[in-house]
Image (spheres, helix red, strand yellow):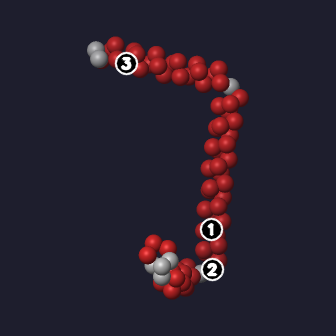
């Protein structure tokens, strides 16, 4: 058994069909674009974590403002 209940021969056949339809150059470009997108996403996540660690007072202030807003909303709506 291969991946997801498919045999290795079925997977190879699908790979050959995809290569014939799209060509290696287009697939290589698609893989590069996907890799760049993942790399950019990881970089943004790391920057967000570093920013949160660098200024915890700012985060506490933002959380306090969010709590105040929720309280104001409850009072306004009578909940």
Q: Secondary structure at mark 1?
A: helix
Q: Quadrant of residue 62?
A: top right
- Distance between mark 3 and mark 1 Cα atoms: 47 Å
Q: Residue at x 61, y 75 (%)?
A: 26
Quickly name the residue at label 1: 31
Q: Position of residue 55 (x, y in %)?
A: 68, 25
Q: Earlier in the sequence, mark 1 or mark 2?
A: 2
Q: Position of residue 74 (x, y in %)?
A: 34, 17
For disc 3, the neighbor class at 10 Å (few under 14, some 14 to 19, many from 20) is few
> On the picture, is 16 further left or further right than 54?
left
Q: Which mark is residue 24?
A: 2
- Distance between mark 3 and mark 2 Cα atoms: 56 Å
- Distance between mark 1 and mark 2 Cα atoms: 10 Å
Rendered position, 56 above or below 42: above
Q: Position of residue 68 (x, y in %)?
A: 46, 16
Q: Residue at x 60, y 24 (%)?
A: 59
Q: Earlier in the sequence, mark 3 or mark 1?
A: 1
Q: Residue at x 65, y 73 (%)?
A: 28
Quickly name the residue at label 3: 73
């Amino acid at each position: 058994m291969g991946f997801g209940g498919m045999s290795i021969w079925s997977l190879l056949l699908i790979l050959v069909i995809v290569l014939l339809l799209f060509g290696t150059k287009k697939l290589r470009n698609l893989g590069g674009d996907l890799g760049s997108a993942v790399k950019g996403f990881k970089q943004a996540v790391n920057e967000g974590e570093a920013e949160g660690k660098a200024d915890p007072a700012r985060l506490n202030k933002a959380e306090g403002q969010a709590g105040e807003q929720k309280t104001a909303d409850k009072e306004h709506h009578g909940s």
